[in-house]
Amino acid sequence: MSKRSKALMLENNELEKSVSGEGAAVLTDIVVYLRSSSLSGYDQELVRRDITQMLIDGERRGESARDVIGEDYKQFCDSVIAEFPRPGLKQRVLAALRDFMLYAAVLLAIKAVFGLITLLLSPELRYRIVITLGDALSAAMILAAAVGIVTYICRNSFSTEKHGSWQALAVLFVIVFAILCAAIFIRRPLFEINIALFALLPIVCFIVYKALDSRID
């Protein structure tokens, strides 16, 4: 995030310590919900600051979070979000690219570690990693699943219903099973790359991520 967003986030972290009891739990759910919104990082922190101050002022008057915000926290957040202009296409694309670079850096780092271990245990060290079609498919499924799970959790931060938990576990099991099957059984090679060069890829992705993150609110 940009310097101004990071500075405001640190201020909000300190301000949030003044919220206690039920208000603190409600504020946590609100912040989680905001993370899945279309607001920029800076606008999210602006909303977070204003709501935090509202809860603090309410506590001083002896009012609960429901007294201050209302019964429907989700509707309240949606109404606040609607007051902000939607980020432009360029900003949305850059934000998506930034997130992709972070996910890619993690996946590539894991692949590099396991590839190095495999090469060290191999009787013939070739110092090359083979990227298969299964690797590409499983990586794509992991990225999609990660984005889907995070979005689902954020969008349902106010939900207290438990009846859908087994369905979520079933879906998660199917996803994990599909990822494992792709990685194990689809062994068609796509290309080979030197292990040293491959090890640089997660570093490059992380550098690009940090560069984009510093320029996006």
Image: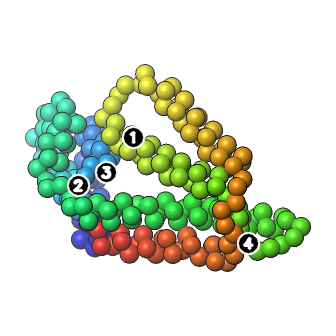
Q: In the image, what residue type sits under mark 3?
A: Arg
The residue sitting at 63% across, 38% down in the picture is: 177
Q: Amino acid at mark 1?
A: Ile
Label 1 and label 2: CA atoms lie apart by 17 Å
| Among numbered discs 1 and 2, the one appearing first in the sequence | 2
Q: Is residue 74 visible?
A: yes
Q: Secondary structure at mark 1?
A: helix
Q: Which residue is mark 2?
A: 39
Circle 1: is it few (<14), some (14-19), or many (20+) Cα within 10 Å? some
Closer to the eye: label 2 or 4? 4
Tag 1 residue: 153
Mark 3 neighbour density, 10 Å: few (under 14) some (14–19) many (20 or more):
some
State the mark number for residue 63.
Answer: none
Residue at the image point whose x is 61% and y is 40% from the top: 178
Q: Is residue 54 left or right of residue 210?
A: left
Q: Position of residue 50 (x, y in %)?
A: 15, 53
Which residue is tagged 3? Answer: 35
The image quadrant that residue 179 belongs to is top right
Q: CA distance from mark 3 to mark 4?
A: 40 Å
The image position of residue 112, as x and y in percent, is: 66, 66
